Amino acid sequence: MPPKAAGKKAGGKTAGKNDKGGKSGAGKKEGAKAKKKKWSKGKVREKLNNMVMWDKATKDKLYADVPKYKVITTSVISDRLKVNGSMAREALRALVEEGLITAVNVTNTCKVYTRAIHAE
């Protein structure tokens, strides 16, 4: 089989310099006239509006409900009582001092507590 002639396509058409796929460029937008890609804004988390000071209702809820939780951590208190992290850590220290919760695993980064079981 002899080699194909240069400049010929499979369909027998000649490939021109500016010919793209055999279609005319009149119907397409090219170059600077083309629309730019629209980027999404991304997902936006809603801002948490946690309390920074104890009020009477929250403190009552702390002493009533938290000692009944099975797993107690800083994030659990922060999430359920809607208080910030430093208040949750302070609450953990107070509950341990009063003997309402007991430590399961205490490290520098993660403190895990559980309800205190009193022998009667």
Image: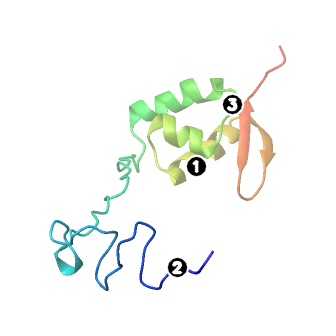
Q: What kind of residue is marked 1?
A: Glu
- Name which of mark 3 and mark 2 comes first in the sequence: 2
Mark 2 crowd level (few <14, some 14–19, many ≥20, 10 Å Cα): few
> How far apart are labels 1 and 3 at the CA level?
14 Å
Whole-percent x and y of residue 37? 29, 66
- Name which of mark 1 and mark 2 comes first in the sequence: 2
Q: Quadrant of the C terminus?
A: top right
Does dot 3 land on a helix, a strand or a loop? loop
- Name which of mark 1 and mark 3 comes first in the sequence: 1
Q: Which mark is residue 4?
A: 2
- Front residue of 118 and 46: 46
- Front residue of 32 and 27: 27
Closer to the camera: disc 1 or disc 2?
2
Whole-percent x and y of residue 46? 35, 48
Mark 1 crowd level (few <14, some 14–19, many ≥20, 10 Å Cα): few
Residue drawn at x 69%, y 27% is: 70
Does dot 1 land on a helix, a strand or a loop? helix
For disc 1, the marked residue is 90
Residue drawn at x 75%, y 27% is: 116
For disc 3, the marked residue is 100
Asked if the residue under mark 2 is in contact with the one under mark 1, i.e. CB atoms within 8 Å, the reply is: no
Q: Which mark is residue 18?
A: none
Q: What kind of residue is marked 2?
A: Lys
* Residue 24 in the image: above or below residue 93: below
